[in-house]
């Protein structure tokens, strides 16, 4: 088995915005924007509301990476995503690789056919969790804590991110755990 980490520097962009921010994986949208001085501390005064409004957007993480011949010699190559938060679509070299909709699990996608020796690109687009829960709640009323955002039970995401009697409404997004290519051959 051969593992090639995709952790480290990425780029993050708010969908529809021309500005690209340096991103660190594992990490999150809020962490990357804070590091770039592109948002105020969400825990200070009422900055929580500005940070919450950011989550009405979609976010795109991208990076270039090198695939060695040794990885491609394996029978199978999986993209292993140990933490995608939460509604994600993955593309490798502009080809669809998979979707994720649960931050509480590891996702694996067979991507050998999408890879080439040398330079490759990966793009992971995270859809707005706030738009998703609002639309889901309109279809089916599912309530939880009265202190949290309506519709939060519809999404497999840390529910405390949607507010609670003790916490703010900061439903972050991003690649929050390790991500890697894993090559292996079945014996």
Image: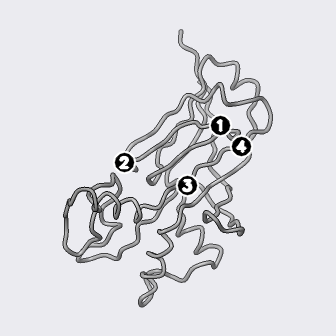
Q: Are marks 1 and 2 in contact (CB under 8 Å)?
A: no
Residue at 42% in and 61% down:
129
Q: Which quadrant of the figure contains the N terminus?
A: top right
Q: Earlier in the sequence, mark 4 or mark 3?
A: 3
Spatial CA distance of label 1 from label 2 is: 25 Å
Residue at 64% in and 61% down:
12
Give the residue at mark 4. 121
Spatial CA distance of label 2 from label 4 is: 25 Å
Q: Earlier in the sequence, mark 1 or mark 2?
A: 1
The nearer-to-camera label among 1 and 2 is: 1
Q: Are marks 4 and 1 in contact (CB under 8 Å)?
A: no
Q: Earlier in the sequence, mark 2 or mark 3?
A: 3
Q: What is the crowding at mark 2: few (fewer than 14 residues within 10 Å), some, or many (at least 20)?
A: some
Q: Is residue 143 above or below residue 181?
A: below
Badge 1 element: strand
The nearer-to-camera label among 4 and 1 is: 1
Nearest the eye: 67 or 135: 135
The nearer-to-camera label among 1 and 3 is: 1
Spatial CA distance of label 1 from label 3 is: 23 Å
Q: Which mark is residue 26?
A: 3
Give the residue at mark 2. 104
Q: Earlier in the sequence, mark 4 or mark 1?
A: 1
Badge 4 element: strand
């Amino acid at each position: 088995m051969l593992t090639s980490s995709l952790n480290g520097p990425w780029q993050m962009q708010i969908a529809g915005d021309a500005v690209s921010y340096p991103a660190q994986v594992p990490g999150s949208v809020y962490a990357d924007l804070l590091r770039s001085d592109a948002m105020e501390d969400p825990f200070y005064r009422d900055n929580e509301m500005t940070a919450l409004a950011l989550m009405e957007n979609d976010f795109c993480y991208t990076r270039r990476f090198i695939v060695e011949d040794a990885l491609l010699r394996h029978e199978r190559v999986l993209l292993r995503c140990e933490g995608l938060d939460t509604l994600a679509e993955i593309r490798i070299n502009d080809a669809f690789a998979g979707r994720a909709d649960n931050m509480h699990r590891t996702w694996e996608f067979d991507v050998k056919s999408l890879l080439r020796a040398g330079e490759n690109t990966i793009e992971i687009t995270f859809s707005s969790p706030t738009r998703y829960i609002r639309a889901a709640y309109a279809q089916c009323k599912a309530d939880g804590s009265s202190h949290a955002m309506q519709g939060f039970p519809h999404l497999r995401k840390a529910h405390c991110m949607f507010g609670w009697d003790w916490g703010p409404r900061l439903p972050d997004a991003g690649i929050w755990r390790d991500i890697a290519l894993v090559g292996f051959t079945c014996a």
